[in-house]
Amino acid sequence: MCPTYVGRIQTRTAVLVLPAILATILSLITQNEGWIVTIGIFYLMGIALDVTFYQYFIAWQPPWLTFVLAIAEFIILFVLLKLLLPGDPPYGVPPDVALVGADDWRPIALFWVSWLLAIFTRIVILPLLSLSWIENGGEFRRTGWSVAPNYQPLPILAAVDEGAKPGKLAREFSSVHSIADLQKGRPLTGVQRIPTGKES
C-alpha cells in the first residue's frame, strides 16, 4: 500500500474509532477523563507522525515494521502522557514521583489494547467496508467511472465470415484432412520410402 496524505489521515481516524469508544466507556465508568484524553493525544500524535515523518521516510511498510513503529509510538505517547498528565490519579504517576509507577499500567494497557484494536480494524474491518481502500492509497472515496459510460469506446467484435475457408496452414495443423489432401501430401507417419531406381 502506498498511502497518500489524505489516506494516512483517514486510515488513522478510522482505526481509532474502536479505541475511542472503549476509552469513552472507561472514562464514564471510572469518572476519569484520562482514558479518552489519552486516545485524543494518541490520535494527534499519530496524525503528526503520519504527515511529517512517515510520509517522507517510509515508502513501503513491511509487516515487521508495524510492530517497531508501535513501540516507537508507545514511547513517544508515554513521554507525552508524563508531561501532560491527562487524567486524575490513579490514572498515571507524575514524572517527579517515578519514571514508571504502579498506576502507569492503565495508560500502558490502554495503548496496547488500542493498538490491537487498530490493527484488527485495519486488517479485517477496513477491507470489508471498502474493497478498493488499499488501491486508493488508504483513502475512503467513492469510485466511479473516470469517463462516462456512454463515452466509453466499445470493443470491436470479430465476425466470422461463413463463406471463408480456412487457409492452408490451418488445414495442415488441423486433425481434419480430406482424402485428396492425404494423397497429394507427404504421409502422416515418419516412415518414408527411399526410391531405389529399380521401380518403374
Image (cartoon, rainbow, N blue to C red):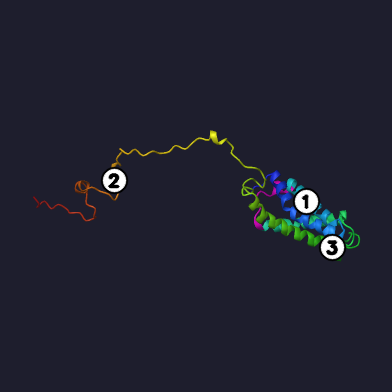
Which residue does the image show at 69% across and 58% down from the upper left? 120
Q: Could you say where residue 189 lies in the image, as x and y percent from the top left?
A: 23, 55
Q: Residue at x 75, y 53 (%)?
A: 17
The residue to which callout 1 is attached is 43
Mark 3 vs 1, N-terminal side: 1
Q: Which x, y percent locates residue 97?
A: 91, 62
Residue furthest to the bottom in view is: 102
- Which secondary structure lies at badge 3? helix
- Label ID, residue 104: 3
Q: Is residue 16 visible?
A: no
Give the total of numbered labels: 3
Q: Residues within 10 Å of mark 1 (few under 14, many from 20)?
A: some
Going from the N terminus, do you reach mark 3 or mark 2 first? 3
The image position of residue 44, as x and y in percent, is: 79, 49
In depth, the one of 30 and 104 nearer the eye is: 30
79 vs 12, left or right, is: right
Identified by mark 1, the residue type is Tyr
Q: Earlier in the sequence, mark 1 or mark 2?
A: 1
Relative image position of residue 42 (x, y in whole percent): 79, 53
The amino acid pointed to by label 2 is Arg
Q: Are marks 3 and 1 in contact (CB under 8 Å)?
A: no
The CA distance from mark 3 to mark 2 is: 84 Å
Q: Magenta stretch: residue 116 in it?
A: no
Q: Nearer the viewer, residue 8 or 121?
A: 121
The residue that mark 2 highlights is 171
